[in-house]
Image (cartoon, rainbow, N blue to C red):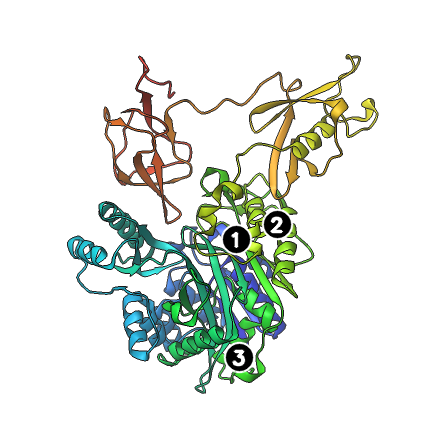
Amino acid sequence: MISSLLIANRGEIARRIERTASTMGLRTIAVHSEADAGMPFVREADIAVAIGPAPAQESYLVPEKILAVARKTGADAIHPGYGFLSENAEFAQLVLDAGLVWVGAPPAAIRAMGLKDAAKALMMTAGVPVTPGYLGEDQSPERLQVEADGIGYPVLIKAVAGGGGKGMRRVDAHADFAEALASCRREAAASFGDDRVLLEKYIVNPRHIEVQVFGDTHGRIVHLFERDCSLQRRHQKVIEEAPAPGMDATTRAVICEAAVKAARSVNYVGAGTIEFIADASEGLRSDRIWFMEMNTRLQVEHPVTEAITGQDLVEWQLRVAAGEPLPLTQDALSISGHAVEARLYAENPRSGFLPSIGPLTHLRLPQDIRVDSGVEEGDEVTPHYDPMIAKLIVHSGSRRAAAKRLARACRSVEVWPVKTNAAFLARALDHPEFLFGRIDTGFIARHQEALVPPGEAGTAVLHSAAQVLVGSGAAPWEALRGFRLNGPPVMTVALEIEGRAHFLDLAAQQPATCQTRYIFGQDVVFADGDAWAFSDITVNSGAVAREAADGAILTPMPGRIVALAVANGEMVVKGQALLTVEAMKMEHRLLAPFDGMVGDLHLKLGDQVGEGTQLLCITRLAATESADCR
């Protein structure tokens, strides 16, 4: 029996596990870094113990520290959540060797499925169809180039030890392979400590379909149907749903049977996910779905499976880990309705989805749907961990109803001053192609302009801001801002939003349709998931934000220089790669904004740079003097 559970994770998933464990009457133990000391998952645990500095490599990824806390607090079991040490076979074995219950897959299964090349070879032996590709041990660039040419472009390079979308590159032509391979290997080494890769044929119209499987210590394995995770950006999931749209009963039976067969081949115990790639060019067909990999842990998107089956998968994990049989047989499991989940991230879609860090001074999340969040108002998004704010989950009787309701929920999100992808999510969920189920992993890239329109405030935002500045229709002496005693009648309002001046005719005012807030001295309009700060230009002495110096290349966030493609005095063309900054385990290439000459470059590979640091300057070709990059 388990009576005391240590959760070796943080944020949203730690909080999620605590909720179920507490319901089951278990004592919960949280471990946390110095940066997480005030987070909700720490406050809500029965016991909380600090394990080190903010960097995960010095806290959450140190097995000895976690095991020491388990001994000190008398824990019976350790749940690793997802990410961090959840798929670390050595850590799992250390937990078992310490006489503790490991709430996860057996170490042997983790090892068997942990390396993508070995896992594919195992699946081929088990009779599970796999994607054509190269799994060889020869990792020389020359051999990999030859194999890629033989497979035929486009080709996908994947880190052998990869996961979470990291260490993956699509290559469309022979000439692009070498550079993509080098970048992929750098990212793989930084994220997983292993730069080996495999190659796969890139499916042009792919759907990402995964099946939730569960095994117990009594030899039983069941599936809990499939999820569709096709809406991805840079190979990272954005919107997930269950069941998969367009999945017929025959195809479902085939893919779920293959998933159970894959799990049985490694004597699987606990929660796991078998991921498949489907060629959706002619819809979902059982003969066009191939095994990709197995995740030997709980998935971020597990709530949609919980919604359509009515089961608590964390409770299943805890019961199976305690030696109990699976709560239900396959015949007792069925699908009810449709569920959709959206990942709300602290990121700015209009700046290439770069993470947005800082305090969550104002945070309003939907109240009428399931929200799994690791933060609350007043907490901070730091550069140390994944910038997800919450998962928003809706369950309804139909796919369309679920999608429309989730879109409304995303539009109601209010976050300031951190930027989020809420408006982007709402547009994706409302998009006609999504509602018709015409999706694949290229959906976001294909509809980029519609999903991330130019960053200009719309009419509703402007009118809402104007109403605030004139007192929202109140008598002028009741207005808090924008009123000038004994001044002439105000017929227009001059305001500034995001550094742009706007002049509105009060006679043409329309009813406000947005929420306006006064947050610590700043006026903010919240509209359809977006947030816009505004101010009265006349009060602000006419000051309008100036653009960054022309030609100055600045770091968008703190990071490390991992690639340097230019030198001082070199001529570059618009769009040419200048250098690459690694931040939060992701690589960000900085490009030339226009044709010109490189100057003021005083950096070298490996240098750490802070946010807003000038890296170099581009002088326009036609200019007689250097651009002012001061």
The label on residue 37 is 1
Residue indicated by mark 3:
319
Q: Is 430 drawn above or below residue 103 in the view shown?
A: above
**Location of residue 581 (image quadrant):** top left
Say which amino acid is labelled 1: Ala
Between 610 and 368, the one lying in front of the other is 368
Which image quadrant: the C terminus? top left
Q: Secondary structure at mark 1?
A: loop
Q: Is 219 drawn above or below residue 274 in the view shown?
A: below
The label on residue 410 is 2
Cα distance, mark 2 to mark 1? Answer: 29 Å
- Give how far across and how far down residue 532 sits, in percent: 61, 34
Which comes before the other along the chain, label 1 or label 3? 1
Say which amino acid is labelled 2: Cys
* Residue furthest bottom as drawn: 218
- Graded by Cα atoms within 10 Å as few (under 14), some (14 to 19) or many (20 or more), the crowding at tag 3 reads many
